[in-house]
Image: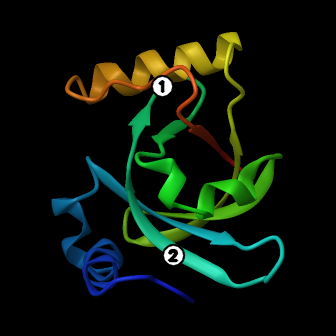
């Protein structure tokens, strides 16, 4: 497991503990394996939910690499409700109707966030 910062480890620890209810409405944990390295990365992320599943906006995407491992439908794990669950994730392509639905759901949930036309959005569905 690799988490890049102490705050990430602390937040993931809370998400795995009985105190997860304090953060469940706003954060979840992701476990993504690197395509080239096979290393597992765990990180907390903000999310929105719609009828199709969960949506994650990758803020400051140029400085992050984890989402690049999800270019195609990929097996991941999601930490919600205090435990890890299998899921599938993929980056939604700009200009598609599904991405627009996901963008609207994310901006509805997080009204101060504006998702640009080329900003990565990740769709997560149960496995």
- Dot 2 lies on which element? strand
* Above or below, 79 relative to 67: below
Quarter holding the N terminus is: bottom right
Residue at 31%, 19% (x, y): give it. 108
Q: Residues within 10 Å of mark 2 (few under 14, many from 20)?
A: many
Left or right side of 74 for 42: left
- In this figure, which residue is indicated by the disc labeled 2? 42
Left or right side of 64 for 125: right
**Residue 125, x across and y down, in percent:** 65, 42
* Identity of the residue furthest to the front in this view: 62
Residue at 60%, 63% (x, y): give it. 65
- In this figure, which residue is indicated by the disc labeled 1? 50
Task: Tell me whether the residue at label 2 lies in contact with that at label 1, contact meaning CB atoms closer than 8 angstroms.
Answer: no
**Residue 123, x across and y down, in percent:** 62, 38
Q: Residue 14 appears in which quarter of the rendering?
A: bottom left
Number of numbered markers: 2
Residue at 67%, 22% (x, y): give it. 94
* Above or below, 83 relative to 3: above
Q: Nearer the viewer, residue 41 or 62?
A: 62
**Residue 36, x across and y down, in percent:** 83, 76
* Above or below, 4 relative to 91: below
Res. 5 mark = none
Q: Residues within 10 Å of mark 1 (few under 14, many from 20)?
A: few
Q: Nearer the viewer, mark 2 or mark 1?
A: 2
Left or right side of 89 for 83: left
Residue at 28%, 55% (x, y): give it. 24
Q: Nearer the viewer, residue 25 or 7?
A: 7
Q: Residue 85 appears in which quarter of the rendering?
A: bottom right
Query: How did the renderer colour the structure?
Result: rainbow
First in sequence: mark 2 vs mark 1 = 2
Q: CA distance from mark 2 to mark 1?
A: 23 Å
- Dot 1 lies on which element? loop
């Amino acid at each position: 497991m690799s988490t890049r910062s102490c705050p990430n480890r602390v937040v993931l620890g809370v998400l795995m503990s009985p105190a997860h209810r304090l953060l469940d409405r706003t954060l979840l944990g992701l476990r993504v394996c690197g395509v080239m390295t096979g290393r597992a990365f765990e990180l907390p992320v903000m999310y929105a939910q719609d009828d199709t599943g969960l949506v994650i906006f990758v803020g400051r995407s140029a400085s992050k690499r984890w989402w690049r491992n999800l270019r195609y439908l990929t097996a991941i794990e999601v930490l919600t409700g205090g435990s890890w669950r299998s899921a599938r994730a993929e980056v939604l392509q700009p200009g598609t109707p599904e991405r627009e639905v996901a963008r609207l759901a994310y901006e509805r949930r997080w009204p101060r966030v504006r998702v640009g036309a080329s900003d990565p959005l990740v769709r997560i569905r149960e496995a």
